[in-house]
Amino acid sequence: MTTENQNSSGPAPVSAPVSRLRSGGRWPWVIAALVIAALGVTSAYFIFKSAGQQSEIEDLKNLAELDKQEMADQYREFDIQYGELQKQIRNDSLLLRIDEERERARRLLKELEQTKATDAREIARLKKEIASLRAVLKSYIVQVDSLNRANADLREENANVKAQVVEATTQISQISSERNVLRDKVDKAAQLDATGFWVTPRNKRGREERKVAKVTSFAFGFTIVKNVTAQNGQRTVYARILKPDNSVFKPMGTFAYENTSVEYTEKKYIEYTGEEQKITMYSDVTEYLEAGTYRLFIFADGQMVGQTSFTLN
């Protein structure tokens, strides 16, 4: 009786753990999925964080470049202000000290230009130098004002100069451009100009001749117009005659024109006074001439001042 009871109740302890083991087989897959999801979230977090840090680094670099550019502008302003101070004083010792400070500002500007914007230590040092330069400049301005205080005219000039300094710091490039344009206008206005050209081919009797075989010389002339802006003094006038085949008639030498050497046929020295002046030149025929159109060019001061043409039959 006892044995039968034991056999009937024996299987129960074995079937219960097996049932629990089978139902619990799903948990490892759930845990693995959660781990993978957590890793994905973490990876995404670090990727976005890295991208944000890279953007911040680029912003810092751009800021450093702007800071460096602003420092360079301040150094250039020091150079302008020291230059204006030097125009106001006649004290040699003070001039020497101001010149030394001006050279110092220029030297520091060169150091800044050679320094990378990301070199924080060097940029910080050069920024401190700006503060030092500003303090020294202020002391010199005070000294100059003190020297000029006794003279009312100098005080007024000093005020005008200060205003010009402020304007110069904001219009440096514009002033340079206007200066170049003005220089070009002055140079062009000072150039000589010729008009009234004439050419007479001559035979051996000195008479006008149009038959190429009988021409023994050329007489030609022109008028240099009045120009009050041109510099007075001795000039060299070059005549260049081109034959129908574009070769130079009787080349006698060369002269400088537009960064090159150009052959000429004849040259003549004149004394220019700024007034209208008639010029006559001659050239003997020493080589074979062909029928056709010849061109005459006149040059002075490295510029072509006029031209004309003529025909031989």
Image: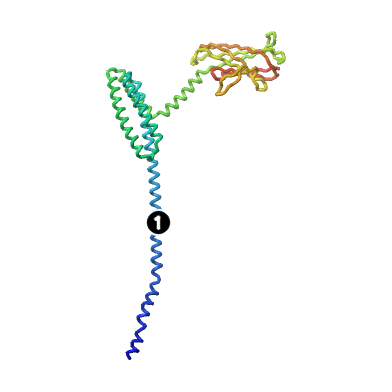
Task: Please indicate, yes or no, whether residue 160 appears anywhere in the rendered image.
Answer: no
**Secondary element at tag 1:** helix
Q: Position of residue 204 (x, y in %)?
A: 70, 9
Of the pair 40 and 155, the residue shown nearer to us: 40
Q: Amino acid at mark 1?
A: Ser
Quarter of the image where one finds residue 138: top left
Give left or right: position of 222 versus 23: right
Q: Residue at x 35, y 82 (%)?
A: 12
Q: Residue at x 52, y 18 (%)?
A: 191
Q: Is residue 55 above or below residue 20?
A: above
Question: Please, which residue is most extreme toward the top here?
Answer: 205
Of the pair 66 and 136, the residue shown nearer to us: 136
The quadrant in which the N terminus is found is: bottom left
Q: Which residue is mark 1?
A: 43
Q: Residues within 10 Å of mark 1 (few under 14, many from 20)?
A: few
The quadrant in which the C terminus is found is: top right
Give left or right: position of 137 versus 175: left
Quarter of the image where one finds residue 178: top left
Q: Residue at x 38, y 66 (%)?
A: 31
Q: Position of residue 126 (x, y in %)?
A: 34, 34
Q: Position of residue 242 (x, y in %)?
A: 64, 20
